[in-house]
Image: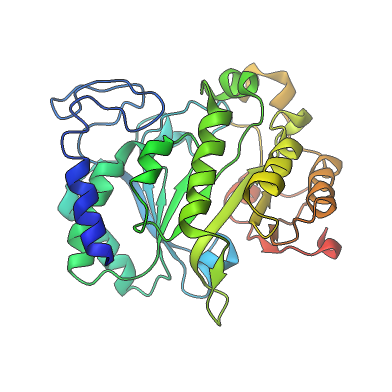
């Protein structure tokens, strides 16, 4: 079955879904079609903060021509340390039509981007599918990347089978108490892990073309938080046991205290080099040898670390 037919079928299945919105784990049940707003605060029409030819993503996504990244406003989590809080929590962005979203995707393809990278898409899945139906019908044919915080409904992810080419989920926590404390995300661990298992079932291990550009597969992002708040070692063990030893990882050192971290002493500092190295060593010890690490420089400006560090290939001698 071709992608356009799959998208068309998914659009039909989601018809009316926002009348009693239950597309993410919150299952608020609000009538977004009628103008009501749930936990995420997102309206019926998509709201986009920015879209760019992004050169700071993982090398397999950014390549030489950039990743066509669309930053959606609002979020179904409330992370105290959110580095994108200006549009995820402070609600900045432009409300656009479905047709305009499709046009943005096509514009990014025309500019040479390797893929369409949907950042924080969980609360806009039906609208994204409607835009994809228009875009693919007009020639959109580059890979679609689902770039998510990991607080997804596995049922929603199942509906994307054959439509999403590359899944790029976070694994923020391995302890639900931490997920509630710092992100107000009850049940995060189960939703995240179940969704990632479904993502892997759909797309498998990362596949790249002869130029090293991702065409299909799973990449898991692991943001290392101070004082083992993220429980990243347990997440790595889950990946090794339940996903694949060939899973591509993006182990990130870019955490810096921002937004509301002043309310939590234990996360109100940068991570230490030893904390980061411990996670990388754990990945190697588990036989997880594929992916990328980030440069660690404790003297580097926080904003630079958060926005401009480019991941590099994952080799033991890199850090």
Q: In which quarter of the image is residue 133?
A: bottom left
Which quadrant is the C terminus positioned in? Answer: bottom right
Of residue 190 and residue 299, the one placed in the foreground of this image is: 190
Q: Is residue 39 visible?
A: yes
Identify whether 61 is placed above or below 273: below
Of residue 34 and residue 194, the one placed in the foreground of this image is: 194
Identify whether 318 is placed above or below 181: below
Residue sitting at x 36%, y 58%: 162
Which quadrant is the N terminus positioned in? Answer: bottom left
Outermost residue on the left side: it is 34
Residue sitting at x 35%, y 31%: 91
* Residue 175 on image: x %, y %: 66, 25
* Residue 248 on image: x %, y %: 64, 58
Of residue 144 and residue 94, the one placed in the foreground of this image is: 144
Residue sitting at x 22%, y 72%: 139
Identify whether 277 is placed above or below 150: below
Q: Can residue 47 be seen in this view?
A: no
- In this picture, residue 291 sits left or right of residue 296: left
Tell me how many marks there are: 0
Q: Quadrant of residue 164?
A: bottom left
Q: In which quarter of the image is residue 227?
A: top right
Residue sitting at x 82%, y 47%: 282
- In this picture, residue 240 sits left or right of residue 211: right
* Residue 96 on image: x %, y %: 20, 45
**Is the image coloured rainbow, by chain, by secondary structure, or in one colour?**
rainbow
- In this picture, residue 128 sits left or right of residue 197: left
């Amino acid at each position: 079955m071709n992608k356009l037919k799959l998208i068309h079928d998914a659009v039909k299945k989601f018809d009316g879904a926002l009348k009693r919105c239950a597309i993410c784990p919150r299952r608020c049940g609000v009538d977004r079609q009628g103008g009501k707003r749930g936990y995420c605060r997102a309206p019926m029409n998509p709201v986009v903060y920015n879209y760019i030819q992004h050169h700071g993503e993982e090398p397999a996504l950014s390549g030489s021509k950039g990743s066509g990244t669309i930053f959606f406003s609002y979020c179904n989590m409330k992370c105290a340390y959110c580095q994108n809080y200006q549009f995820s929590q402070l609600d900045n962005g432009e409300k656009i039509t479905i047709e305009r979203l499709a046009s943005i995707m096509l514009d990014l393809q025309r500019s040479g981007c390797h893929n369409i990278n949907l950042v924080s898409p969980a609360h806009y899945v039906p609208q994204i599918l409607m835009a994809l139906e228009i875009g693919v019908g007009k020639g959109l044919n580059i890979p679609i990347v689902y770039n998510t915080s990991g607080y997804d409904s596995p049922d929603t992810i199942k509906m994307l089978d054959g439509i999403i080419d590359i899944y790029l989920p976070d694994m923020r926590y391995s302890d639900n108490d931490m997920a509630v404390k710092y992100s107000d995300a009850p049940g995060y661990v189960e939703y995240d892990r179940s969704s990632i298992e479904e993502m892997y079932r759909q797309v498998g291990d990362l596949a790249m073309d002869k130029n090293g550009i991702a065409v299909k597969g799973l990449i898991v992002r692991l943001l290392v938080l101070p004082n083992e708040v993220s429980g990243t070692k347990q997440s790595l063990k889950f990946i090794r046991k339940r996903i694949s030893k060939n899973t591509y990882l993006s182990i990130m050192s870019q955490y810096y205290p921002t937004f509301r971290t002043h309310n939590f002493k234990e996360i109100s500092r940068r991570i230490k080099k030893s904390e980061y190295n411990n996670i990388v060593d754990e990945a190697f010890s588990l036989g997880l040898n594929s992916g990328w690490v980030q440069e660690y420089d404790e003297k580097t400006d926080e904003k630079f670390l958060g926005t401009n560090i480019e991941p590099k290939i994952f080799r033991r001698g890199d850090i």
